[in-house]
Every structure is written in structure tokens, then in C-alpha cells.
Amino acid sequence: MSDDKIPSPEAIRKAEENGLVFSEDGKTLLECRDREIREAVIPAGVVSIRGRSFCHCTELARVVIPDSVAAIGAGAFRGCASLSGVTLPPGVREIGELAFFGCESLTEVTIPAGVARIGNSAFGECIELTRADISEGVREIGEEAFSGCEGLASVNLPASVVKIGRCAFSGCAELSCVTIPARVDSIGPGAFAGVGKVVSESSKFPTDEFGALVDTGNRRLLYVPPDVSGYDVPSGVTEIGERAFWRCTGLRSVTIPAGVAVIGRSAFCGCERLLRVTLPVGVTEIADAAFGECTRLVDVTLPAGLVRIGSAAFANCTGLVGMVLPESVIEIGHYAFFDCVSLGKVTIPASVGSVGTDAFEGAACEAEVRRDHPWVFKSPAGG
């Protein structure tokens, strides 16, 4: 990379004819004013592409990034739906958050060795992305970096990686296997939700005989393979992590041991064959969307001591027929039982002080709840 090189006046002039705008010294591409641009050639000598420069240039199909570029700013190419290929030069050091988010036609990407961290959501929702080559030297995969890349079939995590962010590869349904390098010491919840298989070389994140992944430091269950049909959560686990069982469509039964305190966000969301769940004493929170879209769930036993039922916690559980809330429950979140069309009976204790907007909308018991428990709809969060 040649930081001291100044783009030639002729190159700047040609680029400006295509709607590109540069800083006074020519080293920063500030924006693209032609929102229908189809091809962009960035002149040699440009060092950085400012955030949102090409954001939502939906016709942009090709961009040439020179070797001089070191930084690609946040959202620089966000929503460039026609961009089918991009070559990141070896001098790139920074890929900002949302840099290529929603580039729906992008099929392959190679992350250069000089990039220490891939920004949050940098390649999120790149639905046609099939291959991501991450070079040795990259240390951190940001939150949701490749989330929603439903066609991603191949990715390598080099030995240099030490941190994998929350939901980094969530929703990568075509990704049959990911290997976690030995040096990884931090994995965010939901990092591999929906991935076919996870192999771990890290002693901090062992996998069990079912292929489930546990964070031993935080005592959090991180991941369960989507094809598992029954699972006993290991003793010692205190939290079912965010998206741990997300879209485990074959899951029919699960045993949750004493000691678990939190059922994380979307933990069992989309487990459409799950029939019954008993939560042990000690569980204090059922987080947002924890059991959302468990369409065959007919019975849930809630423990004494439960305090919070999160937003959409049981939304679209169309098979759920009845529920008794323990005397300890204080809060019921927005849309908690939304569209539970078979939920004909629910017992709400006097301890409940807050009920979110439309918590029972579409539930069979909605009219009865409003009639028999009017106080819960008078709270500040009420609907």
C-alpha cells in the first residue's frame, strides 16, 4: 500500500464524471452521487472509502478497489444488490460494520491477512454468498458478520482467530461444518445457529457426543446441531444461550437440569416438533422469542421463581392449549402469547404488574384475560 501516493488529476477527473466525490487531497472517497452507477473504478492512491459511499447503489455491479485502499467504512457498499464480485486488495486493514450488508449478488469474498477484525454485520444477508476465505492474521469475526448468508457453503476460520461474535454465522443453513480454532477464547451466543455441524479444537468450548457446544467459562449452552431429536442439557449449565436450539426442526424432547437460570433469546425458536417442556426451579427468565414458532408445543410447565416472560416468548405457539403462570411472575412482554390460537386458558397471578402491548392478541383466551384480569392492561407498558 502506498499511502503517500496522490491520485492523479486525470484519474480523479474520470471518477468524478461517474459521480464520485473525493476529499481535497484525493485520498478519501467521500460519496457516490450517481445512485444508478453500474461500474466504479476507484483511482490508485485513494486510501479510504468513507462509510455509506455507495450505500443502496442497487445497480452497481462491479467495483475496482486499488491496492492503496486500507479502510472500507461502515455501510460503504450496503444494499448494493447487483454487486456480484469484489476483490479486496491485500492492503485493506479495516472492514467496517455493514460494509457489504445486503449485497445479494455477491458470491465469493477473500478477507486479506491485514484485516484484524471483520466488522459487525459486514457481510450479513449476502444471500448468494457461497464461499468466504478468511486469511491467516484475522483475529476477530464481528457480531452477525455473516448472519443470514443462507447460501454460504464454505468458510475457513484460520488459526489466528481468537474471537467469534454473537450470531456471526447464524442462519447459514448451507454451511455443513465449521471448525473452531484452538486459540479461540470468546464465542458469542448464537454464533453458529443453524449451522450443520461444529467441530471445536478449543478446550474452552468443548463439544459433546451429540455435537453440542458449551462455553465452559460462562457455563452457557451455545449450540445444538439442527438435526438432533432429543437432548439432555449437561449439568452445570446455567444458561440456555441465545439461539442454542434455533430451528432444530427435528427436536421432540429436551431435558433441562436444575441450575439453569435463563432461557435465552430465541433459544428454541422454530423447534416445530417440540411437544412438551418442563422448566426446573431456578429459571427466572424466559427471554424474548425463546419458544416462538414452536407450533406443536402443547404443554409448558413453568417453575416457581420465574420472574419475566419476554416479548414474543411463546408467539405463534399455535398448539399451546393452557398455561399456569406462577405467583412469582412480574412481567409479561409484548406479544408474549401472540397468535396462540389454541390457548384457551391462562392463569395470571396478582404479582403481574406489567403486560406488554398485545401480549395476548390472537390468543383464544384474549377476551377472557381482558375480562378477568383488567388490571394488567393498565400498566405503562400495557396495550
Image (spheres, rainbow, N blue to C red):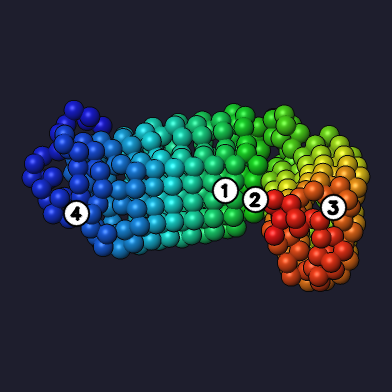
Q: As rendered, which of 5 and 16 lies closer to the eye? A: 16
Residue matched to label 1? 169
Q: Is residue 262 left or right of residue 25?
A: right
Q: Residue at x 83, y 49 (%)?
A: 352
Q: Residues within 10 Å of mark 4 (few under 14, many from 20)?
A: some
Q: Earlier in the sequence, mark 3 or mark 4?
A: 4
Task: Tell me how far mark 3 sits from mark 4, CA to CA.
Answer: 57 Å
Q: Residue at x 16, y 34 (%)?
A: 25
Which numbered marker is on residue 254? 3
Q: Is residue 140 left or right of residue 313?
A: left
Q: Earlier in the sequence, mark 2 or mark 4?
A: 4
Which numbered marker is on residue 303? none
Q: Earlier in the sequence, mark 1 or mark 2?
A: 1
Task: Tell me how far mark 4 sits from mark 1, CA to CA.
Answer: 35 Å
Element type at mark 1 = loop
Residues at discs 2 and 4 in contact (Cβ within 8 Å): no
Residues at discs 1 and 2 in contact (Cβ within 8 Å): yes
Mark 1: amino acid: Phe
x and y percentages locating residue 135 in the rendered image: 44, 37
